[in-house]
Image: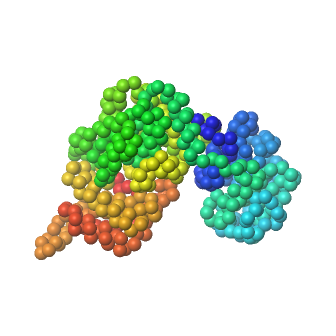
Amino acid sequence: MSSKITQEKILILDFGSQYAQLIARRVREQNVYCEIVRHNITASRIRELAPMGLILSGGPCSVYEKDAPQCDPEIFQLGIPVLGICYGVHQMIHHLGGSVQSVASREYGHALLTQIEANPLWECVSPTTSVWMSHGDQAAQLPEGFVAIGKTDTCDAAAIAHISRPLFGLQFHPEVTHSVEGTQMLRNFLRNVCGCHGTWKLEDFARMMKESIREKVGNGRVLCGLSGGVDSSVVAALLSEAIGDQLSCILVDNGLLRKNEAQQVIEVFSNHFRTDLHVVEAQRLFLENLAGISEPQEKRRRIGHTFIDCFAAEAKKVENASFLAQGTLYPDVIESGGSPDGPAATIKLHHNVGGLPDDLQFELIEPLRDLFKDEVRRLGLQLGLPEEMVWRHPFPGPGLAVRCLGEVTEEKLNVLREADAIVLEELRNAGWYRKTSQTFAVLLPVQSVGVMGDARTYENALAIRSVCTEDFMTADWSRLPYDLLARMSTRIINEIKGINRVVYDISSKPPATIEWE
Ligand code: XMP
């Protein structure tokens, strides 16, 4: 679908950099469409894709290592502008006849870059600016035709450019925020060198995506599972606008959702979007299937299976459904190696709960596969989804069940749901919701002694968990203000029967995980 979307396109060749996705986001922030492709994409394939520029990402290797990833050297002869970043510039130097060396005084972290030659990359960039270095190798000898245009204390060729061809290299990482004017440098490459106008707009994307969905679906019927999360909600909203009453949504209410979540989904997708919404009231069934089970993975397995059974049974009731819409995002596509030109799959820890089996025999529609999460959120707002839904913190497929440690019962779920709602309400009121990545309550299977009035109590303890993270693979605990924690604790203990102690989780991931189970 993506090739139709825009003429202005940049390709990012991924050499295994942890920052390739970040480069892509920075490019899109300039309203220029881009895709991440594998490092060894051929020059002829690039010609077919007709990008306006190439960016070679960094990577952990040294160019001379035995299995170091190499690009097709012909890419430098296409006449298409190339910007090499870190390992990307080593590739450029290596394939064009220069050499790279490992340096003794490795420069990691902050460095001061000083311009030594005027260059289109330097427009509106200060003559000396702070940049972020992260590689032990650097240019030893530049290829013919290249000059250094910027240097740091320990690197004479921290930025290089060809004297007549559109080839540029940066030894540092312009994409990270520590490179203070890095975004301006990328913008200069896109605008001044590649000639991009920044015409990629989400509105256009949404319009073209709707046309493309209509074309694909014809008169068919599309099924869409709703979870309350932002991705599935945006997919459903987009489809509803594209194909109206040819869309059927299924919400499996497993009784493990946050307070009022199912009601909000029902409200939005039956009133605002007027879809054919099927709500499967499966709260009892999930509780029955979880009875007596306290082992976390077994809980996940049962919830996953029960979900599939409910969804499949409901899907059968929808006549003539031949398509299934899913909220796959661009990072999922990249990480699963699911794009023909995309980089090879990296191993990702997957929870994979609630996934649907392949034998459901639907043709898949994945309208968000070209978008990053922040773009999905913007799209959701444009489509008219409530802000609260669009900015909702991520929520695990098995829901409150993995936050209700040990065996799950209706009573425990009710206590946890109310406590969680207080935590979130106070967080929002204090203006901290958007400052944290994920915040929630965990009901502990621990009882402790307390005192209420004159009486001794022996009740449950509850933990508050709040983390800040970019990617959920690592996370730090949020430094919530004491006053806010105090309000949460007081309200929970006063308003919820069954809890007499609240603790705050101050562990980072790793070694802890975000969830407790
Ligand atoms: P952990 O606990 O592994 O969580 O640090 C990382 C992120 O994944 C979410 N998570 C899950 N999501 N099914 C899901 O769909 C699961 O079983 C599951 N377990 C954890 C977690 O909420 C956090 O955002």
Q: Nearer the viewer, residue 442 or 48?
A: 48
x then y, percent, for residue 255? 27, 46
Q: Residue furthest left?
A: 454
Vertical side of 46 occupied by 432: above or below: below
Is residue 141 shown to the viewer in this render? yes
- Which residue is found at the position 47% from the left and 55% from the top? 472
Query: Residue drawn at (27%, 49%), measured in percent from left and top?
Result: 294
* Above or below: residue 493 compared with residue 352: below
Measured as percent of width and height from the top left, residue 108 is found at 66, 65
Q: How many marks?
A: 0
Quadrant occupied by the N terminus: top right
Give me the residue at 41% from left, 66% from top. 431
Q: Is residue 512 above or below residue 341?
A: below
Q: Position of residue 328 (x, y in %)?
A: 49, 41
The answer to whether 210 appears left or right of 157 in the picture is left
Relative depth, front residue between 164 and 208: 208
Residue 61 lies left or right of residue 123; in this view the side is left
In terms of image quadrants, where is residue 130?
A: bottom right
Q: Nearer the viewer, residue 324 or 128?
A: 324
Q: How is the image coloured?
A: rainbow
Q: Is residue 42 visible?
A: no
Give the side of residue 33 with respect to residue 499, left or right: right
Query: x and y percent of residue 493 in the render?
Result: 23, 67
